[in-house]
Structure formats: structure tokens, C-alpha cells
Amino acid sequence: MRSKHHTEQREEFLSSPTEIFTTLVKELQRAHKSIDMEFYIFEGDRIGTTIANILCRKSRQGVRVRLLVDGYGSRNLPRTLQHKMISAGIELRFARTFWHSRNHRKMVIIDNHTALIGSINIADRYISGNRLGLWHDAVLHLKDRTINALHTLFEHDFSAKTKQMYITPHAPYSPILYWSECGGGGGMVRLLKDIVENAEKEIIITTPYFIPPRHALDTLLRGIERGVRIRVIIPERCDILLLDDVIRHSISEAQAIGVEVLVVRRAFVHAKLALVDSKRLVIGSANLDSRSLSYNRELMVSTTNRAVCHSSRLFIDRLQKIATRPTQEQTRATLPKFIIRSLRALM
């Protein structure tokens, strides 16, 4: 839901799919000078075609439009739609990362004044759901506060060549932005430690892919040993079938060290966020898994805005109402452990 008194806020927490995409469309249509977009997945379905048509129209109106998508995540973007955007003057590029790394960032920057950062990609399932049910996502809508740093980061990503993949961009210092390069660079690992070390009472995490490596579990354990209550909300089923057993094994490991795990049935929790003591929200593209912590380009933003934290708490409470503690069946892995270990390292 939109934060209260949103017209007075420089930050808004958006969690309704309709609201997220309505805001995105409205901001794109307002663009006067530039639109910079970076997504892992951009598909040629109904919502993808709608967004592409808006971008084409804005480009023809003289707005500089740049679109960066991941070469693997957006591999199904139709060539006809690619050509249509390029013919309209859109600067379209595919991030060519290493085979085991992805450009997983999701951000939109408009006129270097407004930005949206969160977990959504451009595809119909983020609005209408799929076989797993409706998708639950969240986005932070920003104005002014972090745009310079975000713009510098986008410029780096848009111009990066393969040989530059391990170079960290020299963005203006921003205490609320956290990013990692391909190969990890430790950015997301440091963020997880920062979240745990600065929590006083409670951390609530939502993530679709709950496969924390050993060092991440050790970080969570240190928080639990200090008396911090750590709760993780995940979907019952994964959209990548191969990972269901791996996640079940991870649930058992996490529960063994005192992490509370809740599973949401008949829906897919895709939001990637952490709410710390109901006073600090960290939100963006990173999952609590090895790929996000060690391989991908990720982007997270932190805020202590009271209205935003309150809205995110309401979002979490809605998820908790439809969540349950995992049953024995939901934590029982059927694959051999050596296969699970191999998949954890790869996925």
C-alpha cells in the first residue's frame, strides 16, 4: 500500500502490483529528458509490450531512453520488439556477464529526479501471477535523495564491458545505497552483517530463494545469540522446481540455529526486503542465497522513513496472516545431500 500522506513524502513503499505498475507507467509518461531502466527480466508479453510502447513514444518525443537488460534473464525478449525499440531511438543493451553471474539489478531513473527500486521485473506474472498464485513484490519510490548515486551506478552498468565486470563504480558516497558487482565483491555480504549487527530486537526478511550459504547462517546466528529475533518469510513452492529440495534443506538448517521460518501457500513471495526493529527497511533485488551474495550484480536501498517502515510492516503482517510454520513434509528433502550441496553452490 502507498504510505500515508504520500504527497508530502520523498519516499513511498509500494506493494500492490497494480499500484507498482500504475506508478511506473505514470512516471514514464511524465518523463521530459531521460529514462534509464535496468532489469533482469524484460519479456514481450502484454505488460512488456505496453512498457515498450511507452518507451518508444517517449523516445520519439525527444526523451533519451536507455534500457539495459540481462542477457540471460531477458533472453526471451522477442527480436521484433527489440527492433521496434531500437528503430524508435531507444538505446537497448544486453548485459553480457559471466556464465555464473547475472545483472540482477532492478531500477528505473527518470529525469535524474525520480527512481523506483525493488524486486519487480517487466513480465505479466508480476501482475497476474502464474501457477504458483499471485506474486507479492515491493518497490521503493524515491525522489531526489539518492538519484545522483543511482545515476552514476547506471552509467557504469550501461557502459561496462565484460573485462570490467569486477570493477566497482566510483559513485558519490551514499549511506543508504548498497550494490555488488559480478563476482560479488562482498557488497551484499557486508550489508547482511550490517543488518544483523545493528538490529536490537527483531529482523524480518522476505525472500523467494532461501538458500543461505554457511557464512550467512553464521551471521544470522550471531544475531540470534545476542537475543535478536530473526524471522524469514518465503513461498511454499519455488518457481524453479529444481530448487524446492534445496530450500527445504535450508529451512532445516536455519531452524536448527533458531531462525523462525514461515511459508506462504498458494502465492509467490518475490519481495526481497529486511525490516529491522520496524525502524529501518532494506529493499531491493538481492535474495538470501549464494548467487545474490557472491555472484550477481545486486542493488539494495536502506531507509528509516517512518511512513515507509510502517507501510512495509503492514505488508509483512499481511503475508504473516497467510503464512504458517513449515510442516515436516515441507522441510524434508528427497534429493541426496551431495546433489543438494552441488545445487547450492551453483544456484
Image (cartoon, rainbow, N blue to C red):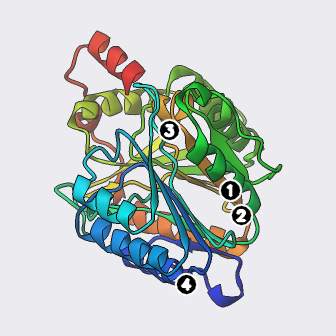
The quarter holding residue 318 reads bottom left
Image coordinates for residue 170, horizontal then vertical, percent = 77, 41
Which of the two discs, 3 and 4, labels the residue nearer the N terminus?
A: 4
> Which amino acid type is shown beneath numbered disc 3?
Leu
> Label 1: how many residues lie within 10 Å, few (<14), some (14-19) or many (20+)?
many
Residue 124 as seen in the image, left or right of residue 21: left
**Residue at numbered disc 3:** 288
> Which amino acid type is shown beneath numbered disc 2?
Ile
Q: Which mark is residue 150?
A: 1
> Label 4: how many residues lie within 10 Å, few (<14), some (14-19) or many (20+)?
few
> Which amino acid type is shown beneath numbered disc 1?
Leu
Quote the CA–CA distance across marks 1 and 3: 23 Å
Image coordinates for residue 64, horizontal then vertical, percent = 56, 68
Name the outermost residue toward the top. 338
Is the C-beta separation of discs 1 and 2 under 8 Å?
yes
Which of the two discs, 4 and 2, labels the residue nearer the N terminus?
A: 4
Q: Which mark is residue 147?
A: 2
> Which amino acid type is shown beneath numbered disc 4?
Arg
Quote the CA–CA distance across marks 3 and 2: 26 Å
Vertical relation: 280 (above or below) 294? below
Name the outermost residue toward the right. 173
Residue 37 as seen in the image, left or right of residue 318: right
Quote the CA–CA distance across marks 3 and 4: 35 Å
Q: Residue at x 52, y 37 (%)?
A: 259
> Label 3: how many residues lie within 10 Å, few (<14), some (14-19) or many (20+)?
many
Mark in the foreground, 3 or 4: 4
Secondary structure under the numbered disc 2 in the rendered image: helix
Which of the two discs, 1 and 4, labels the residue nearer the N terminus?
A: 4
Image coordinates for residue 18, horizontal then vertical, percent = 37, 78
Q: Which mark is residue 30?
A: 4
Is the C-beta separation of discs 3 and 2 under 8 Å?
no
